[in-house]
Image (cartoon, helix red, strand yellow):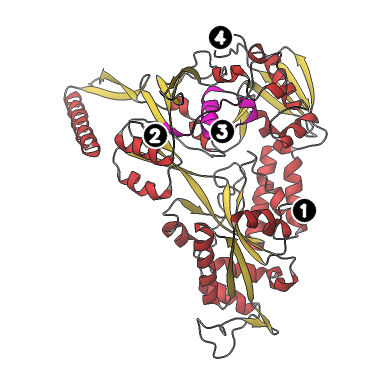
Amino acid sequence: MRVIGWQLLIAATGLGVVGALLFAQSSGLEVTYSPANGGVYVEAVVGQPTFLNPLLRSQTPPDRDLAALTQAGLMRLDASGLPVPDLAATWAVSADGLSYTFVLRQGLRWSDGLPLTLDDVLFSVELLQAPDFPGAPDLSALWSKVVVAKLNANTLKLTLPEANAPFLEQLVFYVQPAHVFAPAVASQLGRHPANARLVGAGPFLLKELISNSDGTLQEAVLTPNLNHYGPAPMLESVRLRFVPDEAAALSALRDGAVMGVGGAPSAAVAAMLADPTIQVYSAPVPKFGVIFLNQRNAAVEFFGEKKVRQALLLGLNRQGFVDQTLQGQGIVARGPVSEGTWAYKADLQTAAFEPKRAAELLAVANWQLPVDALAGTDGYTREKQTKRLAFTLTAADDELGRTLGKLAVDSWKELGVQAVLQLVPAADLYGSVLPGRQFEAVLAMISLESSADPDPYLFWHQTEIDTGLNYSGYENRAISELLERARVSPSIAVRARLYDSFQARFADETPALILFQPVYSYAVSRQVRGVQLGVLLEPSDRFQSVSDWYMVTRRTIRRIAKVP
């Protein structure tokens, strides 16, 4: 009944608008519509907030969503993942890439109305540098080496011990109000009683928390922060409704109790796309399905041959996997840099499914099929100098590992490549198989979510072969040099060119088989307009454009001047 009711409402509204336009035109009038203030947006969020301090970057989705709406940093990430000024008015980096200077915006205020000054930024940095900082150890270790200097009332200088281009993305940390938390020490920050107030400098402020009868939170009510430096949000309110699980969130959306659900599962997206009242927005997330080919394992030394690696990739129907198994909730990966980021090479050609060309490459590399070999039999295996083109593919014993692993093994069998699928518990795959580096080939998911910077150094630089994340054991000095230079250059434009070259070389060399990127699906009522998804480093990034969302439009009528 909900869908039918909405269809009737939409039809009636459409007829009314068309009628009004026709009348206006016949009367010599021009009618335009523009976004206006108003409207309450309600979204279902799975889980309960813990109100961990935003500086600690809680792993709880409700905490992250609340922080994304209420907090601000010196810098923020734009739609391509590029750091741009937020509370900072301007920034500059020295030619040697060691010193960063930030000038704070004038007249900043916290959501409670008190001034936001450089002392608040310094207070937050001191917390990050404290030995007892309860957040991520690597974050504390990085900040402990930074020399901090207050040049004047509005200017901050940060000096690094060595050039580190990805450092800029560390400045997106949420600045905390000293007048609320001082003189608290870092160790007290996690469960500080003031955390639940969420005093911040973001586009919204926490107006009210509504509880259920059992004491759990039912809803967080947020209203525009009138002290926010940027454009005021057009929505009258955002209400985050906390539900116990994904099923409850989807049910609330179907029943019209909420207007949005983030992270919609693939199985539910098809029905949402068919619902005329729902718009589904999608964006790739910084994760990849990858098959690592161990080029340091003597038993599979053929992985050192470029044509073999290229043929294995060309022999996989990756688009078919995305369409059928992922139900379209993924994209075929062109390379090892996340699509949509500023470092992504948009003109990179995708390796298509070309089994014929794959067979030709193997033949050119002298991997020949035995005479009279029959497809589908064990004897249908290519050989070169008595060496068989056969190996074991290890994958996690989960739906992805079983499905994609079988697809790969079956596809390669058609080429005369014999691969045996070995399934192991996911904990073993990531805890011992990959780090142990004794595998032949491994199907795994890798994540770049730990850093906003798209730097792929850790996975492909030659120094990461023995103890890092270069699980393929791929060593190419030209590629390593590109990654080294990109990591220290203070210029985003220079880094982008270097990453372009890296991706082009990677596509040619194919050191590993980059298969696909999953996508994040965000289902929102069509009553809400202006929603846009940029790069999603984490699900809460769906609120990047929230100030532009609107539910109300203003109609303007003006008389069209007649031309004599």
Local packing at callout 1 (Cα closer than 10 Å; few below 14, some 14-19, many 20+) is: few
Question: Foreground: 14 or 62?
Answer: 62
Q: Residue at x 70, y 72 (%)?
A: 300
> Tags 4 and 1 in contact by the CB under 8 Å rule?
no
Q: Which residue is mark 4?
A: 113
> Tags 4 and 3 in contact by the CB under 8 Å rule?
no
Does residue 416 appear in the picture of this structure? Answer: yes
Q: In which image quadrant can residue 125 be found?
A: top right
In this rendering, the label closer to the viewer, 1 or 3: 1
Furthest toward the top, the residue is 114
Label 4 to label 1: alpha-carbon separation: 50 Å
Does residue 490 appear in the picture of this structure? Answer: no
Q: Residue 341: x, y in percent?
A: 58, 42
Left or right: residue 31 compared with residue 67: left
Q: What amino acid type is highlighted by mark number 4?
A: Gly
In primary-sequence order, the first of circles 4 and 2 is 4
Q: Residue at x 51, y 72 (%)?
A: 410
Q: What amino acid type is highlighted by mark number 2?
A: Gly
Residues rendered magenta in the picture: 44-72
Q: What amino acid type is highlighted by mark number 1?
A: Thr
> Tags 3 and 2 in contact by the CB under 8 Å rule?
no
Label 1 secondary element: loop
Is 52 part of what is drawn in magenta? yes
Q: Which residue is mark 3?
A: 78
